[in-house]
Amino acid sequence: MEIRRENTHVPRSVDGYGASAGDHYEDLIRLAGGIDLQILGIGRNGHLAFNEPGSRFDSRTRLIQLTEDSRKANARFFPSIEDVPTHAITQGLGTIQEARHLVVVVSGAEKAAAVRRAVDGPVIEDMPASILQRHPNVSMVLDAAAASLLSRSHFH
């Protein structure tokens, strides 16, 4: 099954600086009747989307400054580290929590500790991905390396 382009949406700056892009994107979500399927990844430090540790669980779509770690992790998509953006527009954790179904895709041993903390650790803002424990409909797709620190009781 193909997802039609008009049914996929990425937040974009509407004023050249992103200042109003968050509110605009939140309005688009409301007008569409909400998000049916949200596809996410988890960063090495447990960030979800670009919600770094310390992001509020009730945060909304907004302009954020990327950490150096996030910039380095995304450098593979750019010709050089100097070309990696310093800022991004990210959905907030509150926005993500309102999606009807979350699919989290994670690969690599370097993310195994974050996956374990997201699944088994306390639900705290210092581990943004831990908020997944509060969502009623989450599917996680993990390679063996990313799942390596989980107990077998987590697999169905």
Image (spheres, grey):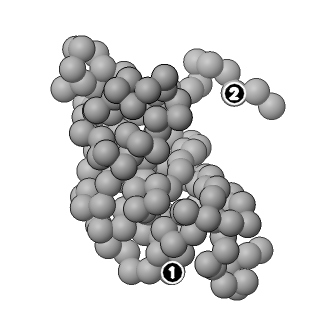
In this figure, which residue is indicated by the disc labeled 2? 3
In this figure, which residue is indicated by the disc labeled 1? 120
Judge by depth and name the residue closer to the eye, 152 or 94: 152
Residue 12 coordinates in the image, percent (x, y) = 36, 22
The residue that appears at 22% across and 14% down in the rendered structure is 15
Identify whether 3 is placed above or below 34: above
Query: Is the C terminus in the top left, top right, bottom left or bottom right quadrant?
Result: bottom right
Q: Amino acid at mark 1?
A: Asp
Labels 1 and 2: the sequence-earlier one: 2
Say if mark 1 contacts mark 2, CB within 8 Å.
Answer: no
Q: Residues within 10 Å of mark 1 (few under 14, many from 20)?
A: some
SS for dot 2: loop
Q: Amino acid at mark 2?
A: Ile
Report the side of 89 relative to 79 (left or right): left
Residue 76 coordinates in the image, percent (x, y) = 53, 34
Q: Is residue 107 visible?
A: yes
* Mark number, residue 69: none
The residue that appears at 21% across and 20% down in the rendered structure is 17
Q: How many marks?
A: 2
Identify whether 37 is placed above or below 76: below
Place residue 37 in its image quadrant: top right
